[in-house]
Each structure stands twice: as C-alpha cells, then as structure tokens.
Amino acid sequence: MSLLPSPHSVPGSHSSDPQFTLRAIATGMVLGALLTPCNIYSGLKIGWAFNMSITAALLSFAFWKVLETTAHTERWGLLENNINQTTASAAASIISSGLVAPIPALAILTNEQLPWSLLSVWILSVSLIGIVVAIGLRHQMLLRDQLPFPAGVATAETVREMYGEGGEALARVKVLLTAGGIAGMVKLVHEAMVTIPKLSTSWVFPIKGPLLNTAGVSTVSLSNLGFVLDPSLLMVGFGSIIGLRAGLSLLLGAILAWGLVGPWVLTQGWIPPEHLTPDSHWFGPMVEWLLWPGVTMMVMASLTSFACSWRTMVSASSRSPNASPSLFTPNDPSMIPRQWFVVGLAMALVFAGTTQIVLFDISWILAIFAVLLSFVLAIVAGRVSGETGITPIGAMGKVSQLTFGLLMPGHVTTNLMAANITGGAAGQCADLLHDLKTGLLIGASPRLQVLAQMFGVLTGSLVGSAVYLVLIPDPQSMLLTIEWPAPAVATWKAVAEVFQQGMEAIPSGSLWAMSLAGLIGVGMVLLEQRVPSAIRRWIPSTPAMGLAFVIPAWNSLSLFLGALLGFIIIKFAKTWGERFLMALAAGLVAGESLTGVASILVELLF
C-alpha cells in the first residue's frame, strides 16, 4: 500500500480546486521578487541562502486571508498556495545560479561585468537546465524510491497545518512580521551609527606580544581580530536555522583562524602591515592569507564527501531518465510527459551552449560538454539533496572547476563560467524536486508546478541580476571586505587563480597551512563517515570550520549565538519552538536583508 496520502486526505484540498490561477502566479512572482534580494544579500554576506517556500506560503496566506475578510475575495486555496510557493521559492533560489559566487569572482579576476539584460539571460539559461533534470528525475526519486526531500516535507506539513488551523498560520505570520520589523529597525539604527568599531570599542581586550614593529603595532586586541559583538539579527536568524553543530563548528573555526593562526601569521610578517592600525579591524589584510587554508578545508571536505557518496553516484547514474520508459507515463495526466523532458533537454542544450559561446567565448565543444556534465552532476545533487536535505552546490562546482582547469589550464573565464552551469543546475534541480515533493504530498499537479517553476526562474533571473548589479557595482573594490565578505566568491576565485597563475597565486607561508587544512578536511569527513550516528553529531562540521576562516569573526560569533538560542528554545520551550522558531528566523533574515537592500537603493536615488 502506498505511503503517500491522497489529495482528499489533505485538509482544504480537493483535486478539482483551482491551482494554476492568475493570482497564484502573480502572488508567487511578487513574493519571489521581494524574497530574492534577501538571498542575494545574505549570500554575499555569509555565502548561505534561505529556503523561501514556507515564508512565501505564510505571507500569501495572510495577505489573501485579509482580503477575503475585508474585500470578500475568493478563498485562497491550498493548491493555489502551492503554486505560489513553487514560483516564489524558484525565484529566491536563483542565488545558486552564480550571482554570489562565480559571476562576481569572474568580475574580480577579469573586470568582466555583464550588463543586466545579458546577465539575466545567462542566469535563466543556467536555471532551466536544473528544471529539465528535475522533470526527468521526479518519477524515479519521488514515486519509486520515495526519497524524503526534507524541505518539501516541511513545506507540505506547514501548509496542511495552515489550512487545518487558520489561526495558527496567522500567528506564525505575526511572529515573522514582528521579527522582520525588529531586525529592520536594528539595521537602520546600526547604519545610522555607521561602523562596527564605534559600537564595539568597549569590548576590546588587549593581548600582549611583539608584532610588526614596522607598522608601529606592538599589541593586538580582540577587536583587531574581529572578536566583537555585531548587532546583526540576520546572523542570529541564520544561526537558529543551521543548528547547534554548525554553530559550534563556526565558533571553533573562528577561534582557530582569527584567534590562533592569524596572530601567529602576523608575527611572521606574512601579512602586509600597511593597513594594520591599532584602532581598526584587520579583516581585510588578514583574510587575503587566511582564505587559502579556509578554502582548502572546504574544498577538500566537499570533494571527500562527494567521493564517499559513490554508491549514490552509481545509483543515480544507473537510474538516469533514459534508463527505462517507465520513468515517464504520458497517458497519466498526473505525470510529466516524456515529450517535456525530450524537448526541454534539446532546448537547454542549445540555450546554455549558445550563451556560453556568445557571452564568454567558450568553445562549442567545451560548452556542450559543460551542459552534459551538468546533467550528470545535477542528478547526483538531486539524490543527495533528497536523502539528506543538503544540496552540494559547492562540491558540484568544485568538481567542474577542477575538470575544466585540467582541460583548459590558464583560462579563468572557462573555468568559472562552465563550472557555473553545474552549480546552478544542481541548485535549481534540487529546489524543484523539493517543491514536487510538497505537491505530491498535497495532491498538486506536477505539470503545473513545472510551469510555475519556470515563471519563478524568469522572475528570479530578472530581479536577482538587477539586485546584484545595484548592490555590487564594483566587485573588485567592494567584495572580500568587512561589508561584503562574500565567502563563496573567495572560494571560487581561489580555485580559479590556482589554475590561472599556478603556485604564484598563493601567498607566502600559506602552503603549510593549506596542506594541514586539506588533511583536516579529508580526515574529518572520513571520520564522520565511519562513526555511529549518535557520535557523528558531535564531530565538528568541516565546511563550517573552513567558512569561519573566510568571514569576520563577529559573524561566526553571531551565528553561534543564534544556534545556541535556537537550541535553548527547542530544549526548554519545545512546543513554542516547533510552532514559531522557523518563522522567527525567517523574519530576522528577511527584515534585515530587505532593509539593507532598501537603504542602498535610497542612497543611489537620493
């Protein structure tokens, strides 16, 4: 007997209810346009993004509930809401298509910045590959293997509760909006006070020791190293989402990077002393050195984890969409027709291949190879995401960078943009599969969800490209700074530099640190693979530790505090935490990021 519920078992759902309505698509596109800047903003801050499905579902429910009460509009149905959240989440997940990683990395290395129209076309071509792969994988992964796809299940459960108890949904929306308002106000106050150093002078503790006499510096303080309290509620919100293990790992990584390795490197004279003044933060000069061991740790951990999932790779490859006609059942209206995949495959191959050739002068052979490689790796990423809830976008990108670095050494544009296709396809494929899981559990039409996803990526491509260009008009001077640490950019840039310049790209004295970091990255992942699950959760997350080398220490502290706060809430107020913690976190993330984007727009206009 199937474990999947029928549509009639879902509160508020009937198979004849309207789904793909004008207001459902319009609501999803509007919410997607509002939520996309949040992920662009947070991606450039800490390299992470937030799944916006639940946020979009809650906000749309509240909006149409108010109109239903005041203007007597038609009831906002569950299946309409599903189309809305599919569209909005597709738009917000456009971040995986390169806007906060390979695209700015290319701008830094080559000063090549596409205009808005061409950048939107590029982002759209990358995202459509992921949609095509997801169409081919739905039957196998969702119906045959019944993979969990945790984000999809969480969204389905939230929507069910929403339509079972409308008052509960409105309560969550109130928490979300209140948290967003508070985070936005804190951001405005923070910006009015201008800089972190002015807020943190009372938290300075000197550490005695001889340092760089040529710079006139004889001591280093915790404030110089970044160990200060930052009033960013966005980081606190993200911390409550990532969990205590990742939060502790970030704290451990920050202590290791900025508390131990960094001061020792200063004493060796491996960091230029020009910008080291007693009353400033030293993130800029120090991160140019620390990012190399940090990136090495993240890359080696990701590749080792990827290699350890060989069974998944074999399973995914042997169950490719062409393996069996039963993957598609065109006569069943609840399935996605085979023709959609075949036509989509051809269109994606031509579209993505053409954009590579025209926009970046990549040879047609490598362009086609990049698209085909993206199909294979997106299949793997989809299965890994389905089993664990984590989409290995970074690992997929690094595999592609290494591949194209060996095929075309020294060609930084080919290295970055061909690999960009793989990461973007993996992210969009996983997002649609999670949405299709939600639709499967509530009795929605997968065909209509695919169409909604296309409207979403169109919205995300247009809005995301515009937001990125407005936020970062000059990547070379603005990124890898205190304001925009952009850790994902640092990772992609470092790998590309090695293939472009060879060992000359690596700063003095960092080879030993990279070797040690690589061994830690490999060893920790191998250890994690071999211990019981009860012990595994106590092993630090190596990617999180590596990330702490690339972002300011105060970000790691805030993320840890958020993770600790989330743990305490779930531990001592479990019922309240299960109801409101995710809404609270989403509000903090959305409130600060939207305020940050709005303040930049105001500066540009006035």
Image: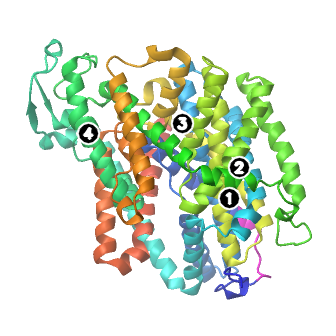
**Residue 599, image x, y percentages:** 44, 44
Looking at the rendered structure, the kind of residue marked 3 is Ala
The residues bearing labels 4 and 2 have C-alpha atoms spaced at a distance of: 38 Å
Identify the residue at image location x=74%, y=63%: 140
The residues bearing labels 4 and 3 have C-alpha atoms spaced at a distance of: 25 Å
Q: Closer to us: mark 4 or mark 3?
A: 4
Identify the residue at image location x=66%, y=81%: 3
Residue underneath mark 2 = 130
Q: Are marks 4 and 2 in contact (CB under 8 Å)?
A: no
The residues bearing labels 1 and 2 have C-alpha atoms spaced at a distance of: 8 Å
Residue underneath mark 3 = 101
Residue underneath mark 4 = 256
Instruction: Classify residue 395 as left or right of residue 219.
Output: right
Q: Secondary structure at mark 3?
A: loop
Single out the residue that lies furthest toward the left: 208
* Quadrant in the rendering for residue 419: top right
Looking at the rendered structure, the kind of residue marked 4 is Leu
> What segment is highlighted magenta in the picture?
15-25
- Characterize the local packing of mark 4: few (<14), some (14-19) or many (20 or more) Cα atoms within 10 angstroms: some
